[in-house]
Image (tube, rainbow, N blue to C red):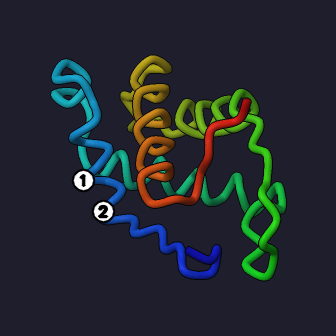
Amino acid sequence: MKPEDLIFDEEEAVKFIMNYLPSEVKEKVSENEIDYILDIMCEYYEENGLMDENSTDEASIDEEAMFNFISKILKKDKQNTISDEDLQWILDGEFEYGKSIGIYTEEG
């Protein structure tokens, strides 16, 4: 599959992530909150030049920097109730979704 054929479907990603989460996290997190976090991730990718549609190069994502970026925005959002632990579960679920559709590969 060519990189330009890979499509990140946000609706499918949200469903995948909800299924990935352990039940205790699932009870605390809504699909809207996951969608919001995916939007913040896109903002991070754009700000760091990681969403260049014309590039076929693999980008290396600093997961800790991305986590801190998202966590900081969530903490500014007074309506947010997502803990750092729950955020990590969501990010792990997003990574697993990305691997399942071929946009991410394991490093190492």
- Residue to which mark 2 is pinned: 12
- Is the C-beta separation of discs 2 and 1 under 8 Å? yes
Mark 1 lies on a secondary structure that is: helix
Q: Percent position (x, y) of residue 6? A: 53, 73
Query: Looking at the picture, does residue 40 appear above or below residue 78?
Result: below
Residue 53 image-quadrant placement: bottom right
Instruction: Report the side of 30 relative to 103 (left or right).
Output: left
Question: Marks 2 and 1, Cα distance to the nearest angstrom?
Answer: 5 Å
Residue 81 lies in quadrant = top left
The quadrant holding residue 30 is: top left
State which quarter of the image contains the N terminus: bottom right
Tell whether 84 sits left or right of 56. Answer: left
At label 2, which amino acid type do we have? Glu
| Mark 2: few/some/many CA within 10 Å (<14, 14-19, 20+) | few
Would you name the residue on which mark 1 appears?
A: 15
Residue at 39% in and 24% down: 86
**In this view of the protein, which residue sits in the foreground, 106 or 66?**
106
Which x, y percent locates residue 11?
31, 65
